[in-house]
Image: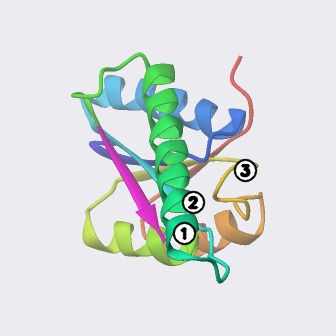
Amino acid sequence: MFKNILVLVDGSEFSINAARAAASMADLYSGKLTLLHVVGKSFSKTTMPDLEQEIAGLRAEGSQILADAIAATGKTEEEVEAILSWGNPIDIILEEVADKNYDLIAMGSRGLGAIRGLLMGSVSERIARSVKCPVLIVKELN
């Protein structure tokens, strides 16, 4: 049933819970798990070295968020596709969903990191209304 699952992660405990829940579903259905982290930061006018340093820091932070989410699933990096992307979170998420045939999208009910708008309401509601597949909003896991 759920053979291709996308999880939106931002480093919050809610998104880690979504990754864990989606990993369980992927195991249950022998499905593929993809984690997506979007850096939604806009850059101020700075000098090139400062900008390069800021980008490198955001890339490292995003990579760590993805690595932490993979570790929370109990899977290896080879078993999970991890995508680090830049831009408007809603636009990037909808582009990713349009490009691939996901059976389920999982996300936390609240966000903290680079996808700051990923709160129950704005982004999650728009994603749920805009996609054809089911959307799983995860709060806490027992």
Give coordinates of residue 54: x percent, y percent: 57, 60
How far, Cα to Cα, is label 2 from label 1? 5 Å
* Nearer the camera: disc 1 or disc 3: 1
The N terminus lies in quadrant? top left
Magenta range = 81-86
Label 1 packing within 10 angstroms: few (<14), some (14-19), many (20+)? some
Label 3 packing within 10 angstroms: few (<14), some (14-19), many (20+)? many
Q: Nearer the viewer, residue 87 or 136?
A: 87
Task: Give me the disc on residue 136.
Answer: none
Above/below status of 85 relative to 28: below
* Nearer the camera: disc 3 or disc 2: 2
Left or right: 105 in relation to 79: right
Residue at the image position 62 percent from the left and 76 percent from the top: 43
Residue 42 position by quadrant: bottom right
The C terminus lies in quadrant? top right
Mark 2, secondary structure of its residue: helix
Q: Which residue is mark 2?
A: 54
Task: Give me the disc on residue 111.
Answer: 3
Q: Give the amino acid type for the residue marked by disc 3 in the picture.
A: Gly
Mark 1, secondary structure of its residue: helix
Q: Give the amino acid type for the residue marked by disc 2 in the picture.
A: Glu
Above/below status of 79 relative to 122: above
How far, Cα to Cα, is label 3 from label 2? 21 Å
Q: Does the magenta segment cover residue 127?
A: no
Task: Give me the disc on residue 51.
Answer: 1
How far, Cα to Cα, is label 1 from label 3? 25 Å
Give coordinates of residue 64: x percent, y percent: 50, 35
Colour setting: rainbow
Q: Earlier in the sequence, mark 3 or mark 2?
A: 2
